[in-house]
Image (cartoon, grey):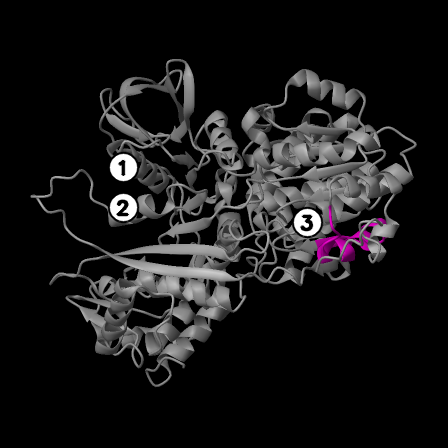
């Protein structure tokens, strides 16, 4: 909703919320030429100004969420200037680039209001940070890692820094939910309340994804029911959608052209001359397609319009891509990972392309929000590649799983369903970090105070006293902590070393990375899980290089331009597929309707997949014999499939899981039926009993400090769903039929 601006009168006279704002803020709105407030702002302004509860504002990208929070915040700060030193508002963002972007927006708003706006992240100099701690005022924009550093390095000053604190804003809140970084942020928000000695209202800004009530529980753990939920009713968006299918054929030896690729050909032909985003599902694919598209520009003798953007590229290269996108004088298309999925203001793009099935419905919705602003329809092109079928093609290829998963994600998107946040985990790795940080902040802490701060009142509420006692014993055994005769917990030798290292502030693990440099310019970094030899050819930052020298001491890779190369291997795993997506895939296989957004090739691939589904009888039986093995297609989410796989492993069945299927090695279909029926009829095991079968459960940053018992508990809580698995087994073995 947008209110009309009567000619020659107040810009938002029909708006009740507009009249609540300070006159200086209303003047800014007028000077900006606004024709009115958006619906999300109309609703949020009185709630934020009241300051009685926490507020979660959910709306699509570019819907005015930032102003919905900061127009009333700035109005309150101007109306009642703080009487004591300290930051009046703290804005927490997951990205430095987003902080820089929001700094420019807020600085324009606050310049005439005498409200200082300051940035604090890794690229801000120490002199500037020192001045901010000496004279804290106004609005502070900060990342979780830099906020952690404040507690560790300036713990004695936190009461001074938060003396005037009236609001905490968490941007892109949905990106934190269910992650170790999110648990860290929840702990830091609680510790801000403790430092300020009051419950500071929290304002969460989020895309309207999943269950907003669960997002509210993330914002205020244990009290999510009291969070005021505000969602936009104006984010409905017209959509132009096309899913193109491709068949990956074996290269023809007679082919004279370099690197034939139909997807790159289509993107080059259709996207040149406008601003676009191409999302790939891995950094390797970003490099691969940027190179393919750049070489097509060179062969055509046209200016290069394709630039890469991912987390391993240097700040200068990422900012170059962002500035190119903001510059409307020259067309550009960024090939990117999720780094451009969040709310950095790059303006509207003409279209969004997705290579491969999107990692989830919520992710696709975020990416789609980059296109179609200002009343224009969003334009989405999906590009799905399937292998050419030969006599030895596995059933997974014949089922055309990638294509059907992409269709399932789109169908759920059109129904406005999004993945809910993951269920609560123990987050013991992050608890290690927060305990050490708490000790650093206060110079020591008692076990009871630590438990109350972090677990009873903080976000680690799933950790009961017994688990916390075992956690302290493991931390002591690892020399992370030591206990004084009076009971006070202090850093041990290993804990002291951890806290004093720059990598401590991040809750997530960061692999050993080498800087890629050329002529004293840093191109970026990538993990070196295997050393590349001198002379090897490399594609990085969308260009081709030859490695001149690898310096293992300085951890640098010196490169020079080359005509050949291949993208490096990056570490990391993909997002788990949700149970609802896999169930939707099964519905699509069993349906006969053909989505109107499929091109001719995609239609043909869908019919091939459906024919295979019918030929294998997967509607009535989940098992398919394949040589000496049996393939199991439960069409359930990855968490449930992992749980079933471990249960089978516990009964002596070796399994391999890939995509929507699972291979039961050396097992006939008859034996597989017997094993599954036995599982379904048996009492569900304790999740810890299944987790104990996993040989290496050290998945998070500080897991290696934990004992086997806690690792087992943590793995079970995060990665297994025994009730869901046993419900699925009951369905799959009931008469041998899938439920419709």
Q: In the picture provided, is 11 more to the left or to the right than 103?
A: right
Q: In the picture provided, is 701 more to the left or to the right than 396?
A: right
Q: Residues within 10 Å of mark 2 (few under 14, many from 20)?
A: few
In the rendered image, residue 145, in percent from the top left (x then y), is placed at 61, 33
Indicate the secondary structure of the residue bearing disc 1: helix
**458 falls in the magenta region:** no
**In the image, residue 586 above or below residue 578:** below
- Residue annotated with mark 2: 265
What stretch of residues is rendered in magenta? 34-56
Q: CA distance from mark 1 to mark 2?
A: 8 Å
**In the image, residue 31 above or below residue 622:** above
First in sequence: mark 1 vs mark 2: 2
- Residue annotated with mark 1: 296
Q: CA distance from mark 3 to mark 2?
A: 38 Å
Residue found at x 26% / y 69%: 609
Q: Quadrant of the C terminus?
A: bottom left
Indicate the secondary structure of the residue bearing disc 2: helix
Q: Which mark is residue 125?
A: none
In the rendered image, residue 556, in percent from the top left (x then y), is placed at 38, 19
First in sequence: mark 3 vs mark 2: 3
Q: Quadrant of residue 658?
A: bottom left
- Residue annotated with mark 3: 65
Residue found at x 42% / y 20%: 522
**In the image, residue 460 above or below residue 117:** below
Q: Residues within 10 Å of mark 3 (few under 14, many from 20)?
A: many
Q: Which of the pair 351/580 is nearer the observer?
A: 351
Contact (Cβ within 8 Å) of mark 1 with mark 3: no
**Of labels 1 and 3, the one closer to you:** 1
Q: Is residue 200 visible?
A: no
Q: Quadrant of residue 121?
A: top right
In the rendered image, residue 647, in percent from the top left (x then y), is placed at 38, 65
């Amino acid at each position: 909703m947008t209110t009309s601006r009567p000619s020659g009168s107040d810009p938002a006279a029909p708006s009740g919320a507009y009249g609540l704002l300070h006159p200086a803020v209303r003047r800014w709105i007028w000077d900006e030429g606004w024709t009115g407030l958006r619906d999300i702002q109309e609703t949020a302004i009185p709630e934020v100004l009241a300051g009685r509860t926490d507020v979660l504002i959910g709306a699509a990208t570019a819907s005015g969420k930032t102003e919905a929070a900061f127009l009333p915040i700035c109005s309150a700060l101007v109306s009642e200037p703080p009487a004591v030193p300290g930051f009046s508002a703290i804005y927490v963002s997951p990205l430095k680039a987003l902080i820089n972007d929001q700094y420019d927006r807020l600085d324009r708003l606050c310049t005439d209001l005498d409200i200082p706006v300051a940035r604090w992240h890794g690229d801000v100099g120490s002199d500037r940070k020192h001045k901010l701690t000496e004279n804290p005022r106004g609005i502070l924009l900060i990342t979780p890692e830099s906020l952690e550093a404040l507690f560790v390095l300036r713990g004695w000053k936190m009461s001074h820094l938060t003396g005037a604190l009236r609001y905490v804003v968490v941007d892109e809140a949905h990106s934190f939910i269910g992650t170790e970084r999110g648990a860290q942020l929840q702990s830091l928000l609680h510790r801000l309340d403790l430092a300020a000695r009051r419950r500071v209202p929290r304002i969460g800004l989020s895309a309207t994804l999943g269950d907003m009530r669960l997002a509210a529980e993330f914002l205020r753990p244990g009290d999510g029911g009291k969070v005021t939920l505000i969602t936009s009713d104006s984010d409905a968006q017209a959509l132009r959608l096309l899913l193109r299918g491709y068949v990956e054929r074996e290269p023809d030896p007679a082919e004279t052209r370099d690197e034939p690729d139909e997807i790159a050909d289509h993107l080059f032909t259709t996207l040149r001359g406008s601003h676009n985003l191409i999302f790939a599902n891995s950094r390797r694919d970003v490099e691969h397609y940027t190179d393919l598209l750049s070489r097509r520009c060179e062969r055509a003798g046209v200016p290069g319009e394709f630039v890469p953007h991912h987390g391993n590229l240097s700040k200068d290269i990422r900012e170059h891509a962002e500035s190119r996108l903001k510059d409307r004088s020259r067309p550009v298309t960024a090939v990117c990972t999720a780094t451009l999925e969040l709310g950095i203001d790059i303006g509207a793009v003409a279209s969004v392309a997705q290579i491969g099935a999107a990692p989830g419905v919520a992710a696709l919705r975020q990416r789609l929000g980059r296109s179609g602003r200002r009343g224009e329809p969003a334009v989405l092109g999906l590009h799905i590649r399937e292998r050419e079928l030969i006599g030895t093609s596995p059933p997974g290829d014949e089922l055309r799983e990638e294509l059907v998963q992409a269709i399932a994600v789109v169908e759920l998107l059109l129904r406005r369903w999004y993945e809910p946040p993951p269920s609560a985990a123990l987050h013991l790795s992050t608890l290690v970090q927060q305990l050490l940080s708490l000790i650093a902040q206060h110079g020591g802490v008692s076990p009871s105070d630590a438990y109350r701060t972090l677990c009873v009142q903080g976000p680690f509420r799933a950790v009961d006293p017994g688990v916390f006692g075992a956690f302290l014993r493991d931390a002591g055994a690892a020399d992370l902590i030591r206990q004084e005769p009076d009971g006070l917990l202090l850093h041990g030798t290993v804990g002291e070393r951890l806290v004093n290292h720059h990598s401590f502030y991040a809750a997530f693990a960061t692999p050993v990375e080498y800087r890629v440099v050329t002529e004293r310019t840093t191109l970026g970094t990538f993990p070196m899980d295997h050393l590349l030899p001198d002379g090897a050819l490399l594609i990085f930052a969308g260009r081709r290089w030859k490695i001149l020298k690898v310096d293992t001491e300085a951890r640098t890779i010196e490169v020079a331009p080359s005509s050949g190369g291949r993208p490096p291997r990056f570490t990391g795993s993909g997002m788990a597929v949700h149970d609802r997506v896999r169930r939707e895939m099964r519905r699509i296989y069993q349906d006969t309707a053909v989505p109107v957004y499929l091109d001719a090739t995609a239609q043909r691939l869908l019919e091939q997949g459906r024919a295979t589904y019918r030929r294998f009888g997967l509607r009535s039986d989940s098992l398919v014999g394949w040589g000496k093995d049996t393939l199991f297609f439960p069409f359930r989410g990855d968490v449930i499939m992992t749980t079933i796989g471990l249960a089978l492993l516990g009964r002596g069945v070796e399994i391999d899981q890939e995509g929507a299927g699972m291979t039961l090695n050396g097992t006939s279909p008859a034996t597989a039926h017997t094993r599954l029926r036995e599982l379904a009829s048996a009492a569900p095991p304790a999740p810890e009993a299944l987790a104990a079968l996993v040989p290496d459960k050290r998945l998070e940053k500080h897991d290696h400090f934990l004992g086997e018992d806690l690792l087992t508990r943590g793995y079970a809580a995060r990665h297994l769903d025994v009730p869901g698995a046993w419900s699925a087994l009951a369905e799959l073995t009931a008469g041998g039929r899938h439920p419709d």
